[in-house]
Image: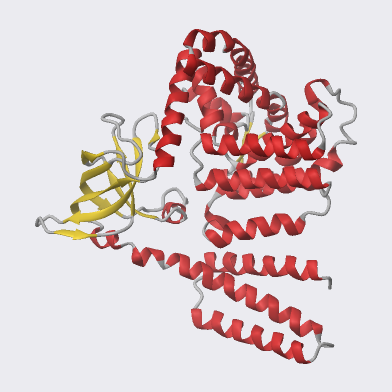
Amino acid sequence: MHRSQVFLFSLISFVAGIGMRSFVEVDLRLSAILAALGSFLVIYWFFERSKIFFGIAGIFLVAFSFGIMRFSWHTSAEERATVLRYAGEAVTIRGIVEDIPDEREKNTRLLMRVSEVISHGGEARAADGRVLVFVNRYPSFQYGDEIRMRGTLEKPESFSGFDYPSYLMKDGIYALMYYPDGELLSSGNGSRIKRMLFAFRGMLERSMENTLPEPHSAFLKGILLGSRASIPSWLLDAFQATGVIHIIALSGFNITIIADNISRTLRKLTISPGGTFWVSLVMISLFTIMVGASPSIVRASLMGVLVLLAIKEGRRYQGPNALTFAGALMILHNPAILRFDVAFQLSFLATVGLLWIAPRMEHPLRFLPEWFNLRTNAATTLSAQLAVLPLLAYQFGAVSVVGLLSNMLILSFMPLTMFWGFLAALMGMIWIPFGILLGGIPYAFISYHIFIVQFFSAIPFAMLYLR
């Protein structure tokens, strides 16, 4: 077995260990025994080089046991979240808003890093842990605000077959508080860089609202910033029915497709593979920073960069090690994403589709014209859709019958929509009339996207429900 294959299967063994531990409770003593056995086999192979099978088996066992131990160590973080000691009690918590507020139609969700808990008896104690706080949209809080919340701490519970506690656990959240009495203590805490990024994001949102009418501005905020707060429910339903809801979720699915489309467009302009890679890398990096560089977005962007790198090196058919290595690194950092982060799973599978299925799809689709990159975009979209289709069916219990066609028609123009929309918003930050004038271009593209989702969502049985 070649060294590259040993490396690949070692990574797979590590991921398999994490995967098994995410489903089954495993005694650490068992994983220690497996690691010891694997180490013994490796040492034996070191002295008996002809027994290469034992060395390879030992490496796989060590990697597998390390995966089990890594997930176990990750789950132990719940024990270190001392704020959980007060679950079920009416308390006052004090802490910092640790991420940009997640504004929804009916409420706002604050990720709060707790530093102090005041019990019902008035005793203040130091505490640690993340709490997801549901508050009314007004008064509003911002990243870096130090706040005090009075309410009941609750542990998350599963509902409708959805493992909500594990979903929150991947982000280190173990407690909830619903609609407490809130008080702002101070502002300007947290990372200065993050405050600047989020301030820029806020200015960009306001510029979009000034340069485009609704629902076009809401659509643009969705695809550029992942914000769903002002998207009307009828449009969200249409996105769901046509299988394009991912375009406003900033998932790895659409980031990898956008990365591939950017590189293809630049190559059409006769830019060298090296130049294409660096221009695309800068654009994806700026996009990641602009939307706040959350862990999920960084992971998705890394998958997009991997697609660009594969195109640059001409290794679309020889990238399993690179893709598996990138995925294993992300899982090493946060083991819970393997099972509980659908965005990561979508980004990984979409990248698989772009690297291995897309090159094989271009020849069967040669009957399509190359207008607006229709043929290449069709191959890209179809490949990514085929790769993620089983996961979508499993996770959501429904598949859009018109999803392949609607995605092809929408994603073909999505890079242009994002580019002109971002440029119009940027100009609107400088001078609103100029932003409104330039906003006519993204307005036309967004009108086209809305027409497509409305048209296809009106088709009877557009969505096939599997359960």
Image quadrant in which you'd find residue 400: top right
170 left or right, relative to 258: left
Figure check: 220 above or below 160: above
Count of picture labels: 0
Q: Left or right: where does residue 49 sit relative to residue 85?
A: right
> From this viewpoint, is residue 254 visible?
no
Q: Is residue 424 visible?
A: yes
Could you tell me residue 285's position as x and y percent?
Answer: 60, 39
The relative height of residue 10 versus residue 290 in the rendered view (above or below) is below
Q: Position of residue 113 (x, y in %)?
A: 32, 51
Left or right: residue 409 versus residue 437 is right
Q: For this rendering, which residue is in front, 259 or 215? A: 259
Residue 169 in the image, given as x and y percentages of width and height: 43, 56
Residue at horizontal 53 percent and vertical 38 percent from the top: 289
Front position in the image: 297 or 338? 297
Q: How is the image coloured?
A: secondary structure
Q: Is residue 333 above or below residue 278?
A: below
Residue depicted at 59% across the width and 13% down the height: 443
Residue in view at x 63 percent, y 68 percent = 14
Q: Quadrant of the C terminus?
A: top right
Left or right position of 374 against 465: right
